[in-house]
Amino acid sequence: MNRDTWAAIAATIAVVIVIILGFRVLGGPGRQRLVQSDHRTVRALAELAQQIKQSWDSSSNRDTLGKVLPANLDKFPASAKQDPLTHQPFIYRPKSNGEYELCATFALDSREAQDPNPDEHWAHPQGDYCFHLDAAQPVPQAPYYFQSY
């Protein structure tokens, strides 16, 4: 075998190794679809939280004592209060003093990311999970892009 043949074999082996490592790090296409569906769910929850905050802010003047959370999500558009992919309704639980929970079901555990951010408000386990929010505080920004997990 000549030098060109060895170079072609080495290049082929290198490409195969890079592809295998890519699948190990990122997961296959099915896993990436699940990651993206969870991203969309988190973004929808953040948008709903923003609408709840706007309702809270407009419920009274300036003091937080006179402000009230919506009792339920009936006045919100149907598309805002359900998972964009599964169309399952989000669970909303008003608490006291502007605190509330928004719950959804997730396909994967985002805390298993390669470089998880421990301060990330929207990190979630696999399965059902509730985020604790406060309408008196700014809504945590949902990242546009999550790391693969």
Image: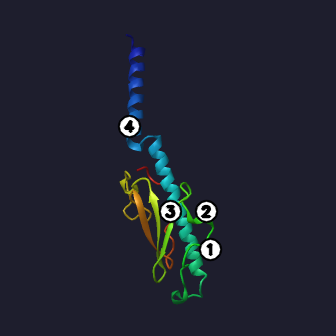
Q: Which residue is mark 3?
A: 142
* C-alpha gap between disc 2 and disc 4: 39 Å
Considering only vertical position in the picture, is 30 above or below 72? above
Secondary structure at badge 1 equals loop
Sequence-first tag of 3 and 2 = 2
Q: Position of residue 78 (x, y in %)?
A: 61, 65
Q: Residues within 10 Å of mark 3 (few under 14, many from 20)?
A: some
Within-10-Å neighbours for mark 4: few <14, some 14–19, many 20+: few
Left/right placement of residue 137 relative to residue 76 reads left
* Residue lying at 38% horizontally and 31% vertically, measured from the top left: 17
- Label 4, on which residue? 21
Marks 2 and 1, how far apart at CA: 12 Å
Task: Name the residue tied to disc 2.
Answer: 79
Q: Quadrant of residue 57?
A: bottom right
Q: Quadrant of residue 63?
A: bottom right
Image depth: mark 3 or mark 1 in front: 1
